[in-house]
Every structure is written in structure tokens, then in C-alpha cells.
Image (cartoon, rainbow, N blue to C red):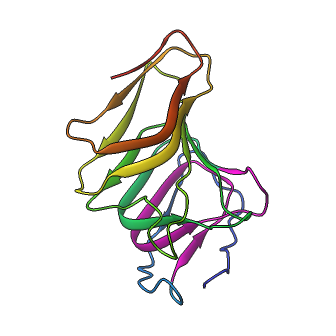
Amino acid sequence: LNKQFPVLNNLDDGSTIDFAYPGTNANTDQVSIPSRSFYNLTLTKGIKYLCSGATGSQITVRNNFVADGASIEVYNDFLGARALNCFGDVSFLNGCRFDGLVNGGIKPMTLKMNGPGPVQRLITNGPWPVEFNYLMRDSAAACNIIVSPNTNLVVKYGIRLTNANATLS
């Protein structure tokens, strides 16, 4: 398991971090994504592990999150990131999997869509379901969360939109 985190300092607004190394072996060749705040985050191809150092932590993306052809996993212990908190559009493209199949059925995480509005998009184009424990919105700003046509979205435990002005369509 590649547990070496890259050193990322002084990320400017507008920057994009793309974890593009094509890790292909679940036991020896994966890419670990640190639990921190990014502006734009892209995960391109291969096996990507979302991880952290604290229970209940989250990965925050201040603008757009794109997973392109990646198999995204969450550690099956207290080190796993528990939420993906996004303020821009969220895209799962080209057969991206986010369902915890590597290393024995790892739990999916929570997707928080907390953009400023008026619209935030959840976009998919692959054959695999995009699976989350919860879909949430904590922000008080009015927002319509638009899910792309033909999206195979599985929300295991529930949807929570805390603002009366938040809609899901």
C-alpha cells in the first residue's frame, strides 16, 4: 500500500490537483489522497484511496471534483475519510467506480454538496452506480442540485437538505 502522501503547500485559488498515477494493484500499487482542502481535485484512472488521520474527517473541494475512470476507495478503518464536501460540480466519468469493492466491501462515504448556488451538478456517464451513505447539504444558501440524466445514484441511508430552499432534481 502506497501510504506516502504528497507534500502540498500553498495551493492557490483556481489550482487543480490531478492524482493521475494509474495505480492498478489493490495490494501494492494504489494512490492515497490526503484528507485536506483542495480548490479543484481530479482523480484520473487507477485505484485511489481517500484517507485521513482522524475519525469523521472529510476531503473538502472548494470548486469542482472530477473522478475520471478511477476506482475510488475509502479505508475500512478509522483512517478513512468519511465525507467528500464539495462546493462546485461533482463528476464521475468514464467508468469511475465509487463503491468500495477493493479490499472487501469498504463502506462508501457521504457526499456533501455545499456550493453557494444557485445550481450545483452531480454528473455521471459510466455504467457503474455512484454509491454514497448519505447525500447532504449543510449550507443555508438556496441551491438546486441537478443530477445528470441516466445517473445510477445509490444513496444507502438518506438525503438531508437542511435548507427549505434546497432542491434535488
Image spot of residue 62 (x, y percent): 58, 41
Query: Is residue 42 shown above or below 70?
Result: above
Q: What residue is rendered at 65% in x and 74% in y?
A: 6
Residues 48 and 40: in front is 48
Say which quadrant the N terminus sits in. Answer: bottom right
Q: Looking at the picture, how far across and down is residue 112, in whole percent?
A: 56, 37
User: Is there any visible trace of residue 153 in the rendered image?
Assistant: yes
Which residues make up the magenta segment?
Answer: 30-58
**Is 57 within the magenta?**
yes
Q: Quadrant of the C terminus?
A: top left
Placement of 169 over or under 59, stated as above or below: above
Q: Is residue 123 magenta?
A: no
Q: Decide: is 50 above or below 125.
A: below
Locate residue 70: give its quadrant. Answer: bottom left
Q: Is residue 137 left or right of residue 117?
A: right
What residue appears at the point 28 percent right and 45 percent down from the top-left corner? 152
Identify the residue at the far bottom of this view: 28
Q: Which residue is at a point 54% across and 65% down the rendered structure image?
A: 106
Left or right: where does residue 6 sit relative to residue 166? right
At a point 45% along the width and 81% down the height, the residue shown is 23
